[in-house]
Image (cartoon, rainbow, N blue to C red):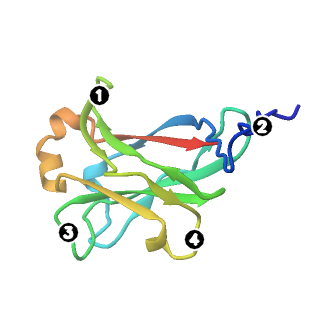
Amino acid sequence: MAVRYPAPPPDSESWCRTCRLDKVKHAFTWTIEQFADRPEDVDEFFESSQFNISRKDGGTTTHWKLVLYPHGIKDNDENILIFLKQVGGPKVRVSHEVSIIDPDSEETWKAEAVDEDWFEEKDKPEAYWRSGHCDTIRELKKEASHWMPDGNLTLMCEVPYWYR
């Protein structure tokens, strides 16, 4: 069934209609077993499994992964870096936040993307990774009894995005 839009007002030379945007919000949880014992060095990363976000109306689906540098990168080797990576689907505008979840399912730390950004699948990683960072791995290990008493680190990434 086609959507019927009203005609422009009769005394108007120009006319504009702005449609309401619908919002999808998706939460992805990633548990990394024995996080403190990960073998990666500075500039080395590992990825979560892929997660998919679909529009409420059954339309377009986007495909994502989280990328984690447990010892940072060369220019920022003091922080754990967490990136949201689009691996498939159309270009979309999203924001995101990543939280560390403690064993009681409480958020103990949260990093939000400063603003929304356009994501799309690209050939070069630096073109589509968006960063957030948290404490150093040393500080995380110091708080391990609270954040990861069993050695496992649980992250939750919430990704809201808007579509027409």
Q: Secondary structure at mark 2?
A: loop
Residue position for label 4: 122
- Amino acid marked by disc 4: Lys
Q: What's the CA distance linking mark 3 and mark 2? A: 59 Å
- Residue at 48%, 49% (x, y): give it: 94
Residue 164, image x, y percentages: 65, 42
- Amino acid marked by disc 2: Ala
Judge the density around disc 4: few (<14), some (14-19), many (≥20) Cα neighbours within 10 Å.
some
Residue position for label 3: 77
Judge the density around disc 2: few (<14), some (14-19), many (≥20) Cα neighbours within 10 Å.
few
Q: What's the CA distance linking mark 1 and mark 3? A: 27 Å
Q: Secondary structure at mark 1?
A: loop
- Amino acid marked by disc 3: Asp
Residue 87, image x, y percentages: 58, 60
Judge the density around disc 3: few (<14), some (14-19), many (≥20) Cα neighbours within 10 Å.
some
**N-terminal-most mark, 3 or 2:** 2
